[in-house]
Amino acid sequence: MFWEGRTTIAGDMHPDRWCILREGGISILHRTIPDSNSGAEGFAALPAERDVLDEIRRLASRLRTENGSLPGDLDFNIPIGWEERIGHLDDRPIRRLIIFLRSTGCEWVEKTGGCTMCGFYCATARGREISAEEYIAQFEHVMDAVDLEDYPVVSIYNDGNIFNEREMPVAAIEKICSYINGYENIKKVVVESRIDYSPDEHVVRMKKALNGRQLEVAFGFESADPRVMNL
């Protein structure tokens, strides 16, 4: 199947024409070019889809590098921040606290360059390992600033995968859970992780450490299209 359209610039028809050729379910953009000898139009394909994907990943990786280095005086005992939002528990609106821990950074970025639409890595330590003690100190900082008893739901995000031990030590999770157990009004804890970084034993261990509180694991769902997911 073939579609053809003209490009309009400043109200005038542009001399070049752009066409979309449907091949095997993949849209490939072509540009019509007059043949210098015969005047016949030809087609010059833009880069293949694989090459475009590789270029997008390369640009995303470069932008992460260029978007500033970590400040030399950054205190890893202090989290990125926290904020209150409206959440829901048992079909009722409630106060929800979201805590953004400054983490080592998503291992998926280190392995593959990361998801091109995600900028969270720039808020992390960008590969600098955060110790269990530093994670615990960050949570203690929030405890000193906010009364967690006011929040039935507490979300703890590390801009990565909380069940990946290379990103979040088990000792830090267990200590944070012990702190949460000191607040009777906290009914549910929300964390985030890729499915492939969430072995059952780690999830079960955190669930047990929360002494009967609800544990919600947010996996994220960007797309069902494998080509989009490969970005």
Image: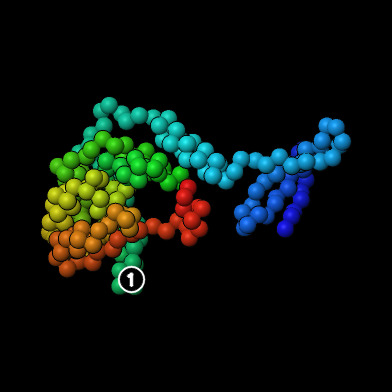
Q: Nearer the viewer, residue 231 or 73?
A: 231
Describe residue 212's horizontal placement relative to residue 99 as left or right. left
Amino acid type shown at disc 1: Arg
Give x and y (percent) for residue 90. Answer: 30, 73
| Residue that appears at 39% across and 43% down | 112
Instruction: Kindly identify which residue carries mark 1.
Output: 92
Q: Quadrant of residue 87?
A: bottom left
Q: Is residue 12 above or below residue 66?
A: below
Q: Horizontal and vertical percent for residue 146?
A: 22, 50
* Left or right of residue 93, residue 52 in this image: right
- Residue furthest top in the image: 72
Using a 10 Å C-alpha cutoff, classify the residue at mark 1 as few (fewer than 14 neighbours), some (14 to 19) or many (20 or more). Answer: few
Q: Nearer the viewer, residue 41 or 164?
A: 41
Helix or strand or loop: what does disc 1 sit on? strand
184 with respect to 51 (left or right):
left
x and y, in percent, of residue 104 in the image = 27, 41
- In the foreground, 138 or 219: 219
Quadrant, the N terminus: bottom right
127 is higher (above) or lower (below) than 217: above
